[in-house]
Amino acid sequence: MTIVSTIIILAILILVHEIGHFWVARRIGIPVYEFSLGFGKKLYSTRKDGVEYSLRLVPLGGFVRMAGEEQGDMNDPQGFNNRKPWEKMAVSFSGPFMNFVLGVIVFIYIFTFIGLGFPSDEPVVGEVIKGKPAYTAGLQSNDRVLSMNGQEINSWDEFVSNIQAYPAGTSLATVVERDGARQTITMISVLDQSSGNPIVGVYPQLNFVRQGIIESIRLGFVQTYQMTMALLGGLGMLFTGAASSSDLAGPVGITSMVGEAARSGMVYLLSFAAFLSINLGVINLLPIPALDGSKIVFALIEMVRRKPMDPEKEGFIHWLGFMFLILLIIFATYNDIVRLIKG
């Protein structure tokens, strides 16, 4: 089910992305030959208004095949390559833009129909962070903490205060209630470098309060903006060396994260889908050959030079970019497999 969920989410994100390219290209008047979801062998196709709509074997991708983008098709006066620079930029930008729009819509839906999450003060575990002391000791979501080292716990604040009352490295005998039965779990706290406080790696449960439509729209844009800035900040850290390239995740890692989000609940799955959509928009706007961002850069160069770049040279640059992206995916997949082996 995790793999199926991942395929469905990625297919929706790609479909929305390609709809952006398709709609703007058609509005401008660029002939579109094919709108495809997926790569490889055709599983199904139909034709309408001169456009072939196809579903292909490998669902991890998609494309809009339009005039003026292929060898032997460069002379069409209505083709992409013969369009004005601003038209090329509009077509290229429309795909990533639709991914940002989808992110906003998903967040609006979450805030309107599920709600905004507020931490509960009940001493009930909401999420256990993988690899932290609580996870290692066997603490689970929905466990109710009754006492710690003999001290009764009646609220989440008391739970946190008791952890921080002892220095990091202290053994914490914690009595919890799980499925109506009591059991004792012993955790050893660790020092959190960012806060300087001892932690065990848990979050409280969240109480979700539905928001009005106006507030949900505002929060949807704010959340999308904040997530975009966070992604750009992460990319900046990656390029400057402040973050490790081993943190890159590929298809296997994304599938694993989708599974974890699905197990945590619908709100987490939808939020992660919105994150992936925004991530797809950000990545595609990078000025890397073969991505939409590079096409925007080439259009800007054409605007300055007042003449387009040689199609063969531009095609070769895009081919190099495509090879780079393939190698990047292979490297990220290697990271995923290493993480799986190490647990």
Image: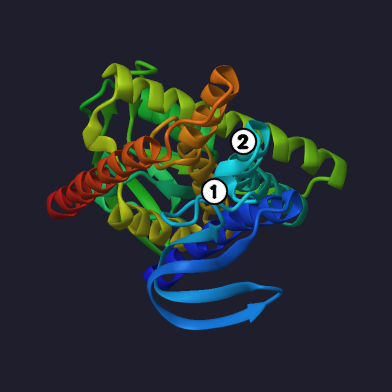
Crowd tier of the residue under label 2, counting other residues whose Cα lies within 10 Å: few below 14, some 14–19, many 20 or above = many
Q: Which amino acid, mark 1?
A: Ser
* Quadrant of image for the N terminus: bottom left
**Circle 2: residue type:** Met
Mark 1 lies on a secondary structure that is helix
Residue at the spot 50% in from the left edge and 68% down from the top edge: 37
Ranked by sequence position, the earlier of labels 2 and 1 is 2
Can you say whether 341 is above or below 228 in the image? below
Q: How many marks?
A: 2
Above or below, 182 against 244 in this view is: below
- Is residue 2 placed above or below 212 in the rendered structure? below
Side of 201 relative to 326 (left or right):
right
Residue 64 drawn above or below residue 205: below
- Reading the image, the residue beneath label 1 is 277
User: What residue did someone put label 2 on?
Assistant: 89
Q: Is disc 2 in contact with disc 1, using a CB cutoff of under 8 Å?
A: no
* Res. 7 in view: yes
Q: Residue 40's spot in the image, x, y percent?
A: 35, 71
In space, the residues marked 2 and 1 are separated at their CA atoms by 20 Å
Residue drawn at point x = 39 percent, y = 53 percent: 176
Instruction: State the colouring used for the structure image.
Output: rainbow
- As drawn, is 189 to the left or to the right of 254? left
Q: Is residue 131 left or right of residue 70?
A: left
